[in-house]
Image (spheres, rainbow, N blue to C red):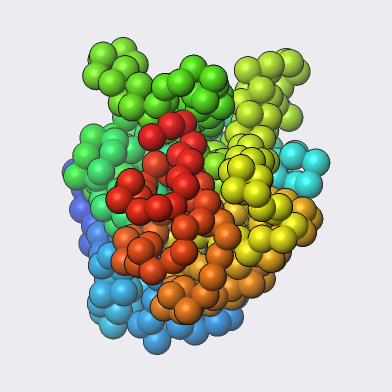
Amino acid sequence: MSLREAQTLYGSDSPADDQREAFRSGNVPVAVYGLGKMGLPLAAVYAETCGNVVGADIDPDVVAAINRGDCHVKREPGLDELVSETVEAGALLAVESPTRAAHEAAVHVVIVPTPITDSNEPDLAILQSVAESIAEGLEPGDLVVVECTVPPGTTRDELLPLLERESDLSREEFGVAVCPERTSSGRALEDIRGAYPKVVGGVDDESTRVAELVYGELTDNEVISVPNATTAEAVKVFEGVYRDVNIALANELAVIADDAGISVNGTIETANTQPFCHLHKPGPGVGGHCIPYYPYFLIEQFDADFPLLRTAREVNDSMPAFTVEKTAELLAEERKSVSDSRVLVLGLTYRSGVEETRATPAGPICADLTERGADVFAVDPMLDDASGFDATLVALESLAEREFDAVVLVTDHDEFAGIDWAGFDPMVVVDGRNALDLSWTDHRVYTIGGD
């Protein structure tokens, strides 16, 4: 359906029930910009809901795979089937041109990466490029929805003026709203369909109303309308910042566990039985494309010192070095040097069961061990190679044939449950995730935070 044939939702005088029916029947075509690990599940859920979605991605291999009914996003339960079904039904089509998608849609949903630069400044270049493409096809009555995470104020101060300027439309002629994604890898469909409430906030009341109507059809959960787009942006950033600060607190408590002579993990578990205490777990560091980045969406955006956020980042960034130092200390107690040791790193991705390696603590851990002269090996069932890591990737099945002086558990993949620890000669084991019970072995085990 072309845009000229499409019904619009923003500024429409039709009753809300008629608008919902128009959306669900496919008379309001949707474009989803970005078909990555979060964008493709979102596009597929839109497609199963309204039956008229075009997804845009600049990667020709991604576009070709989707149009064959294949799913390039791995380990997302149900996504393979949903992509195949919606493509076969004609409900989902992928294109390489965001501009083409913009000309064919009345609702534009943006879910592209928003990383940070090497100097920790938010990098919104991809979002801005997509917005320029949308503006080329933007028509009166269209709605633009931002699902990607951005610094508070971005939609109001940057995106909306860009859309106005590049489309030659006034802000009263189209809607813009923020509905931040609240989705985790490995459970994307469950999250999108309603594991948590949706949050929507528009640049005006009509934008908020239409976004609430649309997402009310996508989710089985409630839709929470907040006063404006900036508030919706802040909700997502605040969620991530809370986790970063909370993990930093747990990590700082873990560092003192040795001197205190206690198990911080056990102490935290007990403390959390009190309803006002929600301490997270310590570990070897914080990784992924979200939590390590979001504090800088505030630090670099606003004129404030942010001592707490900066300290939390410093604490969490220090944990890989702490992990390596503990490994070195335990080896020294066994009269071994790191420089003469073979060290196995278990897990390179930042979280179990996912392929994502951005900001993973395994990176600096491998680099530090290598710099100290260790022969570093790594095993990760999610990865086919160890590109970017100072380590030699080995197969999980081959571990029994190898000898190591130390093992560092960084990521607790389910596949590691089958490791035959009794098959190794006694060695040093640093458990970064409080996941191992090796009390029955002769291995010397240190758990971050205590046993």
In the image, taking residue 146 as reference, residue 167 lies left or right, namely right
Whether residue 10 is visible to the viewer of this picture, yes or no, is no
In which quadrant of the rendered image does the C terminus lie?
Answer: top left
The residue closer to the viewer here, 57 or 409, is 409
Nearest the eye: 372 or 119: 372
Farthest-out residue, bottom: 68
Residue, x 66% and y 60% (percent of image)? 341
Q: Horizontal and vertical percent for residue 311?
A: 66, 22
State the residue in front, 28 or 43.
43
Locate residue 177, reporting x and y percent: 48, 38
Image point 23% across, 35% down: which residue?
A: 222
Q: Which of 339 and 190 is in front in this view?
A: 339
Residue 43 pos. (x, y %): 39, 62
Query: Which residue is the extreme one toward the front?
Result: 335
Task: Tell me where residue 188 appears, x and y as whole percent.
Answer: 34, 55
* Above-or-below relation of 412 to 208: below
Above or below, comparing residue 2 to residue 13 in the picture = below
